[in-house]
Amino acid sequence: MVKSSWLLPKLPIWLRRPLEERIIGVRFTASAPFTTFKVNCSMSWFLYILRCKDQSLYTGITWDLKRRVKEHNSRIKSCLQLSKIPVRLVYWERFEDRYLAAKREKEIKGWSRVKKQKLVDSLH
């Protein structure tokens, strides 16, 4: 027995697209309603620790270390006070996605200064 198409539930548009396009993503625009775009899945995220001018340690995450350190030193998109600039990158870790980097950042931010200093010193 063949089921009639009207008996089957209507699937949303995004489920009717091929699987590859659903994984990559679909951008809807007026000129091209089903233009696909690729997301850079190999993008790395970094957890970083900076040593500030007053010897304090600042922990954060970014996807571009060089740019982020430059932003801190020029006070662009930075919450650091003038008394803490310039900063120097003293430690970093690479992660596959933002979630893991943020999880590690939260863990390290909960540490004491002594424990963070031991982590930084473990590289030298």
Image (cartoon, rainbow, N blue to C red):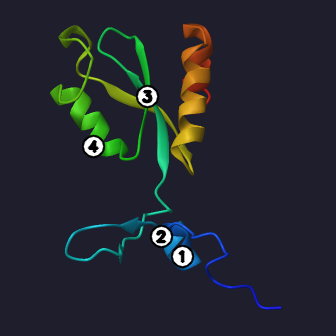
The Cα atoms of the two marked residues, 1 and 3, are separated by 40 Å
Dot 2 lies on which element?
helix
Q: Residue at x 25, y 68 (%)?
A: 29
Q: Which residue is mark 2?
A: 13
Q: Are marks 1 and 2 in contact (CB under 8 Å)?
A: yes
Screen quadrant of the N terminus: bottom right
Q: Residue at x 50, y 62 (%)?
A: 42
Residue type highlighted by circle 4: Arg
Residue furthest to the right: 1
Mark 2 Cα within 10 Å, few/some/many (few <14, many 20+)?
Answer: few
Q: Earlier in the sequence, mark 1 or mark 4?
A: 1
Q: Which residue is mark 1?
A: 16
The reply to whether residue 79 is in sight is yes
Q: Residue at x 62, y 14 (%)?
A: 115
Res 2 → quadrant: bottom right
Mark 3 Cα within 10 Å, few/some/many (few <14, many 20+)?
Answer: some
- When the figure is inspected, residue 121 is found, relative to residue 48, above or below; the finding is above
The Cα atoms of the two marked residues, 3 and 2, are separated by 39 Å
Pick the front one: 44 or 4:
4
The reply to whether residue 124 is in sight is no
Q: Are marks 1 and 4 in contact (CB under 8 Å)?
A: no
Mark 1 Cα within 10 Å, few/some/many (few <14, many 20+)?
Answer: few
Residue 111 percent coordinates (x, y) = 61, 13
Q: Earlier in the sequence, mark 4 or mark 3?
A: 3
Dot 4 lies on which element?
helix
Residue type highlighted by circle 2: Ile
Pick the front one: 60 or 14:
14
Q: Which residue is mark 4?
A: 67
The Cα atoms of the two marked residues, 2 and 4, are separated by 39 Å
